[in-house]
Amino acid sequence: SQTIHQWPATLVQPVGSPLSLECTVEGTSNPNLYWYRQAAGRGLQLLFYSVGIGQISSEVPQNLSASRPQDRQFILSSKKLLLSDSGFYLCAWTASGPYGYTFGSGTRLTVV
Amino acid sequence: KNEVEQSPQNLTAQEGEFITINCSYSVGISALHWLQQHPGGGIVSLFMLSSGKKKHGRLIATINIQEKHSSLHITASHPRDSAVYICATNTNAGKSTFGDGTTLTVKP
């Protein structure tokens, strides 16, 4: 069966520090991968999506970047965190075609 | 302006009531999703639709491709249905767009 792993669950980082959040999917190949952010009390905001290795589409210009070094690995990074980067970050995947989403459990990031 | 619009933004119902949440979108899509987010943040996929209607237990989702509109219905609502319900669309290129969500509170 397919599973998605996202870690860490919570993270407190100082302003200006780097960030690396990792997401891996098991049990499928060539998934569409997504990174979302949800600010407190707000809806989901698509940050990046990838339809294949090395293929990254960015939806919102910001302080973050994403990479897909392997088929089932999606990484969200920042060189220097800002206070405004605080939020709930969710990774998700879908199979290519008309399939539903599966979300990771999320990472709650607080930048202090 | 979000390409995916949900209504209402907030909804309070009494236990047992029939609930409808609406979603309208503005561009051609390959699929529409209804998601449920609980207070802890976890998100569960409820339905994926490309046409017609789907039913799962007390939940029913419909989509009208021509009108670019979808509805999520909950029959015999229960307090445990209290959550944020999110409509999301996919394009063939893999892009997804999310509505801002509908916060549902079902009172006993």
Image (cartoon, rainbow, N blue to C red):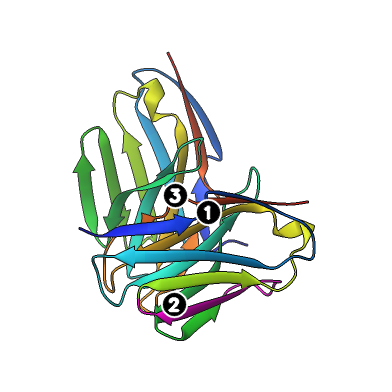
Q: Position of residue A104 (x, y in %)?
A: 42, 54
Magenta segment: A59-71
Between A94 and A14, the one lying in front of the other is A14
Residue marked by disc 1: A8
Visible in this render: residue B66? no
- Nearer the observer: mark 3 or 1; the answer is 1
In which quadrant of the rendered view does residue B106 lie? top left
Which element carries disc 3, helix, strand or loop? loop
Amino acid type assigned to the residue bearing label 2 in the image: Ser
Q: In this view, does B20 lie to the left or right of B39?
A: left
Q: Report how far apart the C-alphas of labels 2 and 1 lie in the structure.
A: 21 Å
Residue at mark 1: chain: A
Mark drawn on residue B8: none
Q: How far apart are marks 3 and 1 (CA)?
A: 10 Å
Residue A81 higher or lower than B42, as above or below: below
Q: Is A66 within the magenta?
A: yes
Q: Sequence-wise, which precedes: disc 2 or disc 3? A: 2
Which residue has dot 2 on it?
A: A50
Q: Is residue A67 above or below residue A18?
A: below
Q: With respect to residue B16, does B68 lie above or below?
A: below
Quadrant (top left, top right, bottom left, bottom right) of the N terminus of chain B: bottom right
